[in-house]
Amino acid sequence: MDSRTPRILGVIGALLAILAIVLSIFKLETYADLSAFLSFIFILSSLFLYGKFFKEGKIFNFALIGYILQILGGAILAILLFNFGDINNIFSTKNLIPFLVFYILWAISGYFLKQSFTLLGEKLNYNLFKIGGKLIFWGNVLTIILIGLFINLIGSLLVIVAFLTSPEPKSE
């Protein structure tokens, strides 16, 4: 494996994640969803290759769980809102449970992503992954008060920088 491949895949994936956040802010949900999906694929591919290189499957597994929880949370939110919620009044009490379920899964997903990036940072001996992972986690937790989206954006930017500037992986 060329040691640059996981880095390149990671950069592309992190850029797509930021694009998804920006597209969501501008209410371009279809494009945001596509960008987020492609981001998952590229980042998971990168983390899979890093995990294979370091013989540490948790790097990939934690991220996979995190992304599955994000997708599951979004799907549950959409299903519950469209079937039981009040689409015309987003602040309706009928919408409380769907948003609460989504929020809990979103926060838990941030924890697993943090674990994945922390483990990768430890294996590469590069703290920028750890910091980016922590910001993504806290961004997910604070999404409930909207500032979390910006913290998540900063965490994603740090992950891009980490992928771009990380040292070449060395076998243990």
Image (tube, rainbow, N blue to C red):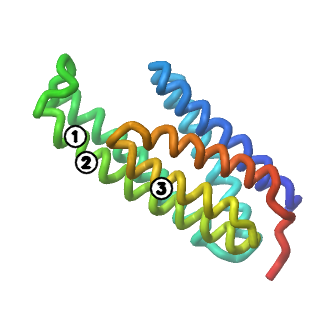
**CB contact under 8 Å: marks 2 and 1:** yes
Mark 3 or mark 1: name the one nearer the start of the chain.
1
- Which structural element holds mark 3? helix
Alpha carbons under labels 2 and 3: distance apart: 17 Å
Q: What is the quadrant of residue 86 in the picture?
A: top left
* Residue 165 place in picture, x, y as percent: 82, 54
Q: Amino acid at mark 1?
A: Pro
Kindly indicate whether the residue at mark 3 contacts the one at mark 2 (C-beta within 8 angstroms): no
Q: What residue appears at the point 65 percent right and 75 percent down from the top-left corner?
A: 56
What is the x, y in percent for residue 41?
A: 61, 45
Secondary element under disc 1, as helix, strand or loop, is helix
Callout 2 amino acid: Val
Q: Which residue is mark 2?
A: 101
User: Observer-nearest residue: 128 or 122?
Assistant: 128
Q: Would residue 116 appear left or right of 5 to someone viewing this image? A: left
Question: Which quarter of the rendering shows the N terminus?
Answer: bottom right
Question: How far is disc 2 from disc 1 in space, using C-alphas?
Answer: 5 Å
Residue at the spot of label 1 = 98
| Image quarter of residue 17 | top right
Q: Residues within 10 Å of mark 1 (few under 14, many from 20)?
A: many
Residue shown at the point (48%, 56%) measured from the top left: 137
Residue at the spot 69% in from the left edge and 66% down from the top edge: 127
Instruction: Provide the residue designation for mark 3.
Output: 137
Left or right of 118? Residue 143 is left
Q: Which residue is drawn at the image coordinates 54% and 37% (left, top)?
A: 36
99 and 158: which is toward the camera: 158
Q: Quadrant of residue 16?
A: top right
